[in-house]
Image (cartoon, helix red, strand yellow):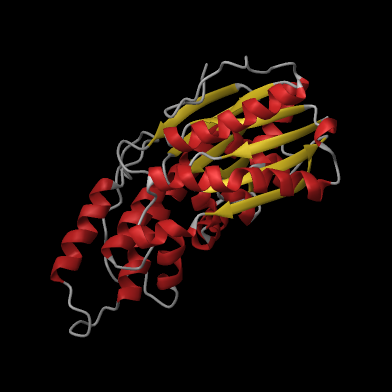
Amino acid sequence: MIVLGIETSCDETAAAICHDGKIVTGIVSSQQIHKEFGGVVPEIASREHEYLLNTIVDDAIQKSGYKLEELDGIAVTQGPGLAGTLLTGVCFAKGLAQGLSIPIIGVNHLEAHIFANFLADPNLQYPFICLLVSGGHTQLWYVYNIGKYKLLGETLDDAAGEAFDKGARILKLGYPGGPAIEKESQGGNPQAVEFPRGLLKDDSFNFSFSGLKTSLLYFMDKFTDGNSKLTVQDIAASYQAAIIDVLSLKLMRAADKYDVDTCVIAGGVAANKNLRKTIRSMIGNRKIIYPELELCTDNAAMIAYLGELKLENRVHSKIEFGIKPNLKIATF
């Protein structure tokens, strides 16, 4: 089966071709225009998708070596995401699917992030614990099988990626915040500042990062660079450590409680090298899987892969399906 995947949930315009579970081509264009605003501007993101989408999809098909007429289906992100950007991708995909008379499947962006780990390790076995951590979501999932998920915990306020973005803004490090803070942290002392670890003493698997962000804001109000033994590198490293400690410890607690041998990390924050190093040091004899760096951030390869799995099981969407900006993963 040959499936085209389209992703436009936020500020990445992406297309990929999946053939029998293998990604043949994957193209991602990240919108750089948002850097000057310190965050994604939805209206601008939608216009950029409209401008780029036809070229990106055409390039993906051309580089795959296949023809449009050989496509067996189209998978497109239905949600969650920004309403305008989702609408751009879904409308494009619907028009193409109708023109080719092939099925279309609306894909849950978060579910696709989980299944990106099967691209990293095709031998991944159920069940496993997944830490899904991105700019908009921080969740712990017990994955029994495809379509069978149990939500163990989630953030009660800011997501980890959002905490990185807001922290970078406070530290004046630029956007996106995760890579900026990770870069600034190099050479810094992660124990220099004792920032709070939200809900770490809580027995639940929920997360909270708003208090950490506020603590950094108050700290920087009193901080004067050059008149302190601390450096911005120390502060960035300490802030990053506070986020990573909570993510890592909650993941380990979930793995212990449910006696699971495999843990996977999904979402954009999974690209953070310090997070990977910390979890690896704590994981013990368990297996830990991360997607390739290009599969951590938003991409169409994971959309095409999950779309193909669903289409193979004769699951597809009616052509009139709508976008769902607040779409959640179904649990049982």
Residue furthest out toward the bottom: 226
Front residue of this view, candidates 23 and 210: 23
Q: Residue 1 location in percent, x, y?
A: 83, 29
Q: Residue 2 location in percent, x, y?
A: 81, 33
Front residue of this view, candidates 320 and 2: 320
Front residue of this view, candidates 105 and 85: 85
Left or right of 184, for residue 118: right
Inspect this view and state whether residue 260 appears: no
Inspect this view and state whether residue 265 appears: yes
**Up-down relation of residue 14 to residue 73 (above or below):** below
Please name the residue shown 42% across and 28% down the image: 326
Residue furthest out toward the left: 222
Please state the total of marks drawn on the protein image.
Answer: 0
Q: Quadrant of residue 91?
A: top right
Left or right of 171, for residue 100: right
Front residue of this view, candidates 137 and 100: 100
**Up-down relation of residue 166 to residue 171 (above or below):** above
Please name the residue shown 75% across and 18% down the image: 313
Q: Quadrant of residue 206?
A: top left
Please name the residue shown 51% across and 40% down the image: 132
Left or right of 193, for residue 227: left
Q: Residue 150 location in percent, x, y?
A: 51, 24
**Up-down relation of residue 60 to residue 193 (above or below):** above
Q: Residue 177 location in percent, x, y?
A: 40, 59
